[in-house]
Image: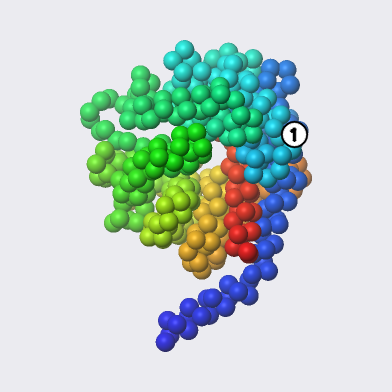
Amino acid sequence: MAADAQQNSQEQEVIMKAPLLNNYAEQYRRELLNNVLPFWLRHSKDEKNGGYFTCLERDGRVFDTDKFIWLQGREVWCFSYMYNMVSPKEEWRQMALHGAGFLEKYGRDANGNWYFSLTAEGRPLTQAHNIFSDCFAAMAFAALDKIAPEDRYKEIAVNTFNNILQRKDNWKGIYNKTYPGTRPLKGFSLPMILCNLSIELEHLLGAQQVDALVPDVIHEVMDVFYQPNHGLILENVYPDGSFSNSFEGRLLNPGHAIEAMWFIMDLGKRRQDPALIRKACDILLHTLEYGWDKEHGGIFYFMDILGHPPQQLEWDQKLWWVHMETLVALAKGYELTGEVRCLQWFEKVHQYTWSHFRDEQYGEWYGYLNRKGEPLLSLKGGKWKGCFHVPRALYQVWKTWDRIME
């Protein structure tokens, strides 16, 4: 009886908060359309050379002209996606085509691998050592094909995706600094991205190929990297999923794990698998509770799963993408499971994120805060932050709360 009374109380609390949820949808929609996308349209486009500037000061001024392929791809994806899913605004379509033209002309080496960085004019700066350039190039051209169908866009997306699959077990190749055989750890980042990337390319790959890929990806994330004894997902494990008591093996990145859980929930929805969704939601909540800074608020960037000092000196910084992806995961978790803790955490993370990362004066959002939640860098874009996590999260949260209210 007591349990029933508690559940009824929780359900009543959710019902009473329904008008607030509706305001969330409108708040996120306005921020996306009136603030964030216009900021990148105004400041990011390189009219002379093509492509985008991503190293932007607080007010949008360009402070470095180098071009990082994964951020170029992310921005092509963003404006293609918004054109397709939000509104067919011609300026968004032209913005996507502008970046794609630069990528198509300069982005790849002779073997079809995507460089990490180029000069403003498109000359290679950093070799194709990072497969995430390939991931976001594939994502970009797949999204572009939906708004400007071209055989060559399809070919670039599919060939790049197939190249990723061929390289996935040794994607660093000749650039791998690890001595072979001593500690053969594998990383979480690529399986995590493949959860989302396979769906992004489904219209090109076909449902049958995606259906064949998805079980292995889910297994990697939910069985290999997930550690049941801790209830957490590690960044690096031995090939069989066993634990390595080393700096790399003890590493937890709460943001990566939480972002992966909304990818898994999307796959669970696609597969009509409520048990998978529930497990992802539970991992999300446990990771958030573990990674939340109980003294200053916000989510830690890196942690050591055994409580030892982390190797990363930036471990206690609060990063934009970690908090944005957490908001997406919590909204989806609440939508798909009705778990009241998702709503409670959403409100808490929402308040922290909007009060600390959003720049009232110049628009867009800060990327890096110190542990106390104060802006550490004034930039709005750089080598790692571009036109991606903020707009994608704003869109996802907006649409998720819209569905909840329906």
For this view, does 393 lie left or right of residue 267? right
> Could one spot residue 214 in this view of the protein?
yes
Q: Is residue 187 left or right of residue 288?
A: left
Q: Is residue 60 visible?
A: no
> What percent of the width, then of the height, locates residue 185?
29, 35
Assign the N terminus to one quadrant of the image.
bottom left
The image position of residue 250, as x and y in percent, is 33, 45
- Residue drawn at (58%, 75%), measured in percent from left and top? 13
Which structural element holds mark 1?
helix
- Badge 1 amino acid: Glu
Q: Where is 166 relative to 122, above or below?
A: below
Residue 82: give x, y in percent of width and height. 66, 41
Single out the residue that lies furthest toward the left: 181
Q: Is residue 253 above or below residue 278?
A: above
Residue at 43 percent across and 22 percent down: it is: 129
Q: Residue at x 26, y 33 (%)?
A: 184
Task: Give whichever of 187, 21 is nearer the camera.
Answer: 21
Packing grade of label 1 (10 A; few <14, some 14-19, many >=20) is few
Residue, disc 1:
90
Task: Judge by depth and name the residue closer to the eye, 261 or 80.
Answer: 80
Q: Quadrant of the C terminus?
A: bottom right
Give the left or right position of residue 147, taking residue 191 as reference: right
Residue 33, percent from left and from top: 73, 45
